[in-house]
Image (tube, coloured by chain):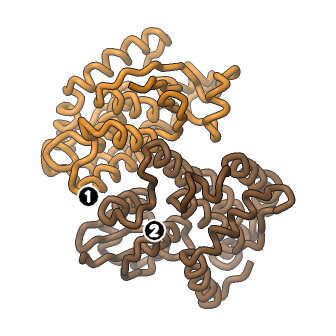
Chain colours: A brown, B orange
Amino acid sequence: MAKLTLYGVELSPYVRKVRLALAFKGLDYQQIAVFPFMEDKPVEFVEHSPLGKIPLFASDDNFITDSDVIIAYLERAYPQPALLPTDDIAAARALWFAEYASSKMVEVIGGHLFAEVILAKQFFNREPIQTDIDKAITTEIPEICTYLENQLSSDYLVGDSFTLADLCVGAMFLMMHHCQQRCDASKWPKVAAYIERVHGSKLFTDLQAEEKELFVKYGMTA
Amino acid sequence: MAKLTLYGVELSPYVRKVRLALAFKGLDYQQIAVFPFMEDKPVEFVEHSPLGKIPLFASDDNFITDSDVIIAYLERAYPQPALLPTDDIAAARALWFAEYASSKMVEVIGGHLFAEVILAKQFFNREPIQTDIDKAITTEIPEICTYLENQLSSDYLVGDSFTLADLCVGAMFLMMHHCQQRCDASKWPKVAAYIERVHGSKLFTDLQAEEKELFVKYGMTA
């Protein structure tokens, strides 16, 4: 069994996604806290993360960076349990939702909400940009919920079981909940029920318990 | 055999990448020209490209968007010839260079160089931002060349044969050549020889011939 190491901090949506994938696959790993802007980063991080981004991952001394690449590696090297459906079109659909989470949802929920509501004052020592927060709540998150409401035709986003799509989209809604924002069940009933279903799985209840401790550790509040 | 359709225009680095992947796999497809900002987009494009981005791809009536997702689909559905190495770590390395091309190289060569040198005047009807062009030429492209010079230890970026890494990175250098910029062989000899090698392959000479016609068709000059 290779020695697995994850460099990054849990607050990052990209690190969270990889942690969920590692937990889903039942893999043990060591985590080394690296903030993107900290000085004195571990030397192996500087050497193997050419864009200075988190997460960086190592399997023994093979380094892999970029969350999507790390997850693709994990899916190949540790195929069971599978994060992608067997069917090629369904797999592409799951990869699309992962991409949607990493682009649109990170931009809105990570950038306009979490970064402003939580990180601005407590980590960046500046006033939050209220127009970004307002835009996220009144326009952008409703657009996301409407899109997903139209995509949901079963209990999960792709096929009838949990896939990478649910891992990535579910992780984004977890970050939204950290900011005390919820999907309105009267407007988006399928999405609201879906979030409850995904967040009720052991994968997510375990993560939520860990993140609660982190919020206490870092003295974070929404 | 499924009917394959690609929506997008060749000038986009993301569309170019998918066209190269389709050519590499020897797949026939229909291309439908869609500019991201054109009005009257095909109705199926509006319906199936939720972020309005090109390319969109269809296999019969199964729509897939995002260039990385499309390529992942092609690699699964049409595994031979393979774009990814068999070895998991080598495959991750190839996916990393694809990501590096799509992020850093698109930002610099697509955004700071091609968009300003070629698109600004001829398509956006505005003056180019000279500081972006200067920054690309004096700082950012040298950084990219230096990074790649240190990564090249054989004729190709990963292992001893052509992979997705070379397809994606090679496509970016093609876009740089459209802007009359070249990698300086006296400073980055391995990269310069590598570009010549990759661009000399039939995959790239065919594409270059097609793009030459496009430049004439659109009346484009650098």
Q: Is residue B105 above or below residue B212?
A: below
Amino acid type for the residue under numbered disc 1: Asp
Between the C-alphas of marks 2 and 1, the distance is: 17 Å
**Label drawn at residue A21:** 2
Find disc 1 in the rendering and name its residue: B88
Q: Position of residue A199 (x, y in %)?
A: 64, 72
Query: In which quadrant of the rendered view does residue A133 lie?
Result: bottom right
Mark 2 surroundings within 10 Å by alpha-carbon count, few (fewer than 14), some (14 through 19), many (20 or more): many
Q: Is residue A143 above or below residue A76?
A: above
Query: In which quadrant of the rendered view does residue A126 lie?
Result: bottom right
Amino acid type for the residue under numbered disc 2: Ala
Which residue: 36% across, 46% down? B98
**For numbered disc 1, what is the local secondary structure?**
helix
Classify residue A186 as left or right of residue A210. right
Which residue: 82% across, 62% down? A185
**Label drawn at residue B177:** none
